[in-house]
Image: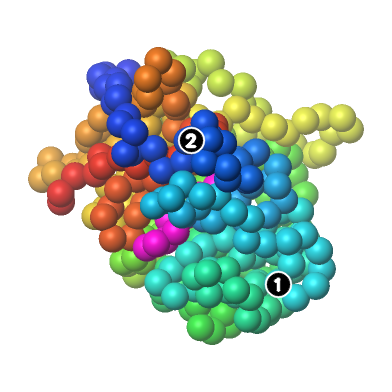
């Protein structure tokens, strides 16, 4: 277990150039592009395009970073290739995979978002992220198909019945509150290395390529002490008793070189490692012209290793990871 104190790291502000802005709403409007970001919830970078879940549009959006054009790639509904109100998605070298939560199915598309098949899934489970080999499945309360004590399972992408590992023990038993401690962030890189974190806690659990837990990092910061989090002691459900919690981490990635990127209230934190162990490489905020653009959702470009970042209505790219 290793503790890393965010307060002790300096915050660097990066001034963005016009070339780094892959989507600028003012430019898009001037160019006559119809679609703009409404309420983005996640982003995935492909080799050519950038894919954005936007609940304001109720669809997956595709951004062409060369032109800045943003288009809706899916439609709402229950028909073939259509999606319910919320979904999760992953992009690998050849596929776009969307988990339609409402209809308990995986939709498969090519990289141009042309639909070609659906497969039924276990209701209540969330499917994703994925790489070319594996699919990470997250259990939500009431979901079936898991051992009771675990929240994540790893399955083969081409055979979801082949279970490779179960990870992340439940902190709150089934049927107890606060169930918010059963919610997770998690990510997997191309080498099958995985990172996971309970949403209300700044604890980062690292797993190797065989899905063995090998390290836990605890991020410390004075701002974390003031977050509104329910007590972790399991209790019976109480009427009108909320179970929400402020999140110390807002998005989380494990990069292909092993670095960690975490979006926090202090800024975008990059954690690297050397012979002495993990360390905070830097904390970054971003500015374009006179405005600050805090990172909200992040992805890694599969070829360049650049981070693709959404900040409110803007999408930009930066290079922050180490060369390790």
Q: Secondary structure at mark 2?
A: helix
Q: Locate residue 283, reporting x and y percent.
A: 31, 27
Question: Which quarter shows the N terminus?
Answer: top left
Q: Between disc 1 and disc 2, whose residue precedes?
A: 2
Residue 27's label in the rendered image is 2
Q: Locate residue 74, reporting x and y percent.
A: 67, 62
In this view, which residue lies farthest toward the left? Answer: 275
Magenta span of residues: 40-49
Q: Which residue occupies 31% across, 66% down?
A: 191
Left or right of residue 43, residue 121 in this image? right
Q: Locate residue 239, reporting x and y percent.
A: 89, 32
The colour scheme used here is rainbow
Residue 190's label in the rendered image is none
Label 1, label 2: how many angstroms apart (C-alpha)?
31 Å
Q: Which residue occupies 34% across, 33% down?
A: 18
* The quarter of the displayed image where residue 207 is located: bottom left
Left or right of residue 4, residue 111 in this image? right
Q: Secondary structure at mark 1?
A: loop
Left or right of residue 43, residue 219 in this image? left
Q: Locate residue 47, reporting x and y percent.
A: 37, 63
In the image, residue 274 sits, relative to residue 155, either above or below, namely above
Left or right of residue 184, residue 2 in this image? left
Q: Which residue occupies 74% across, 67% down?
A: 82
Q: Which residue occupies 25% across, 40% down?
A: 320
Is 256 one of the magenta-colored residues?
Answer: no
Label 1 belongs to which residue? 81
Give the camera-side residue of 119 and 316. Answer: 316
Number of marks present in the image shown: 2
In the image, residue 299 sits, relative to residue 17, either above or below, namely below
């Amino acid at each position: 277990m290793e503790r890393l104190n965010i307060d002790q790291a300096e915050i660097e502000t990066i001034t963005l150039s016009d070339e780094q802005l892959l989507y600028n709403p003012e430019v898009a409007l001037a160019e006559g592009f119809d679609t703009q970001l409404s309420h983005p919830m996640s982003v995935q970078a492909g080799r050519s395009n950038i894919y954005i879940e936007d609940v304001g549009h109720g669809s997956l959006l595709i951004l062409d970073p060369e032109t800045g054009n943003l288009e809706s790639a899916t439609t709402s509904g229950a028909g073939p290739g259509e999606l319910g109100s919320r979904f999760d998605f992953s992009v690998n070298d050849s596929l776009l995979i969307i988990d339609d939560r409402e209809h308990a199915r995986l939709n498969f598309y090519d990289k141009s978002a042309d639909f070609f098949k659906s497969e039924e899934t276990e209701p209540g489970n969330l499917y994703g992220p994925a790489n070319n080999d594996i699919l990470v499945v997250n259990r939500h309360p009431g979901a079936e198909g898991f051992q009771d004590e675990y929240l994540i399972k790893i399955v083969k992408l081409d055979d979801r019945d082949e279970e490779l590992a179960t990870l992340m023990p439940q902190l709150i038993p089934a049927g107890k509150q606060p169930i918010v401690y059963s919610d997770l962030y998690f990510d997997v890189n191309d080498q099958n290395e995985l990172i996971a974190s309970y949403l209300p806690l700044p604890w980062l659990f690292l797993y190797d390529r065989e899905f063995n837990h090998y390290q836990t990092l605890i991020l410390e910061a004075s701002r974390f002490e003031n977050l509104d989090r329910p007590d972790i002691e399991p209790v019976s459900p109480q009427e009108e008793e909320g179970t929400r919690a402020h999140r110390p981490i807002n998005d989380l990635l494990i990069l292909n070189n092993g670095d960690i990127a975490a979006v926090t209230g202090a800024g975008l934190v990059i954690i690297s490692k050397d012979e002495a162990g993990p360390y905070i490489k830097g904390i970054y905020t971003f500015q374009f012209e006179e405005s600050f653009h805090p990172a909200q959702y992040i992805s890694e470009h599969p070829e360049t290793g650049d981070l693709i970042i959404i900040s409110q209505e803007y999408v930009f790219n930066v290079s922050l990871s180490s060369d390790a």
